[in-house]
Amino acid sequence: MTLLEKVPLAAIRKVQNEITEASGLPNPAYNDPEFFNFERDHLFAKTWAALDYESALPELGYAKPLDFMGLPILMLRDKENQIRVFHNVCSHRGMVLVTEEGPVKNLVRCPYHSWSYDLSGELKSTPHIGGVGVNTAEGFNCEANGLKEISSDIWMGIVFFNLSGEAGSFADFIAPLERRWEEFVGPGVFDKLQVAPTHGTLELNVKSNWKLAIENYCEAYHLPWVHPGLNTYSPLDQHVNLHVNDYMSGQGSLNYQWMEVEGDSLPKFPSWPEDKQTVGEYISLYPNVMLGLQVDHTFALIVQPQACNASREKLQLFYVDEESVSESKEECREAVLNAWEVVFKEDIFAIERMQLGRSSPAFTGGVFSPVLDVPSHVFHKWVASYYEKGLSEKGLSESAS
Ligand code: FES
Ligand SMILES: [Fe+2]
């Protein structure tokens, strides 16, 4: 069965209809392993996707291997403190280079024939390549055989990468969100946020496709039933839909309540507007980041797809200043992390049961609330546009017509 037989173009195009006439993405988009690989090459690879956090590389020369939807990737911090992302594969006979994270000092050495690369990916040593004791070979050019680097950039401590190199400038990609949120936090703040040594991270494994985590985050509709606690102080009627552009949507709360622990609270962004202290914004940055902005902290949840029916959610909290991450504020940070942990764990049963529902032939993409599901529909339309482009690139649209 071809991909287009599994997911006909008509089903993909139906997503693009006006919301009252639209269907959601069909089941194979959530439970077909071949479609998962298709998404990697025709959706994730074509745009700026989130890989991991900069904080995963704690020192100069630190390297971390990652499996991104089956691709071996190497993320490292070079000696100039620049984060670089490479394909984690030796140019000689294709061995995966690094299998355990840690400091690599000066060279990444392949354990097979000991070819070595510096931290900028240049091939520096090729022992015996020209015969025993001869470390160069006629016509062999080290420069042409370095590691294959992947475009990457950092924003709010998140390492973004673009596998195809076709996504255009990262600055342009992030500008609409940066401009929007600089109205709250002021210019240049996203490079200066602080990561706390304790109570700053959380990892959740969910038995669901990555898209269900993202689309669930787009809407506040489920709040009264899935998050009864949150709903007491930030109820559904205090939420608004956010449609930033065609690759960012979500919801805003008008009633964010910052944590107080025995009368103490976290420092707030100094330039945050006085009349918007209780505004919180929760935006999905497609394909795979969920972001939150409040007066006293921000957060990101990167969704790392593991399989068509499994994902890892990696949360990182970011704070306003050094005082926020000091020992004296530890209890406040703990309260913030605990509150978010409750909320994100409450969402798990919902997205896992939506995943199970996608085994039912009675479900063919479903429908949307024309009001409260608008941000989810924006996400579905974005995904569908990549499917359509990708399927025509594969030449499948022709064969189906
Ligand atoms: S495969 Fe890496 S040195 Fe031969
Ligand atoms: Fe939720």
Image (cartoon, rainbow, N blue to C red):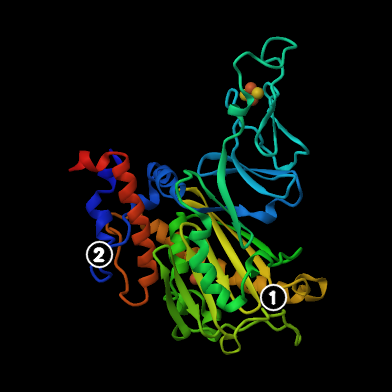
Would you place residue 60 above or below residue 246 in this image?
A: above
Which quadrant does the N terminus fall into? top left
Residue at image point 57% right, 82% down:
256
Q: Which of marks 2 and 1 is nearer the N terminus?
A: 2
Q: What residue type is labelled 2?
A: Asn
Mark 2 to mark 1 CA distance (whole Å): 43 Å
Which quadrant does the C terminus fall into? top left
Q: Do the residues labelled 2 and 1 touch (CB within 8 Å)?
A: no
* Residue furthest out toward the left: 401
Find disc 1 in the rendering and name its residue.
335
Give SS at disc 1.
helix
Residue 358 place in picture, x, y as percent: 36, 56
Which of the 4 quarters of the picture holds residue 136? top right
Residue at image point 64% right, 60% down:
157
Ligand 1 sits in quadrant: top right
Q: What residue type is labelled 1?
A: Ala
* Residue furthest out toward the bottom: 275
Q: How crowded is mark 1: few (under 14 residues within 10 Å), some or many (20 or more)?
A: some
Residue 277 place in picture, x, y as percent: 60, 85
Would you place residue 302 above or below residue 273 in this image?
A: above
Of tags 2 and 1, the one toward the viewer is 2
**Along the horizontal axis of the image, is 235 left or right of 14?**
right
**Along the horizontal axis of the image, is 175 left or right of 331?**
left
Residue at image point 75% right, 74% down:
324
* Residue 6 numbered tag: none
* Residue furthest out toward the top: 131
Find disc 2 in the rendering and name its residue.
17
**Along the horizontal axis of the image, is 279 left or right of 55?**
left
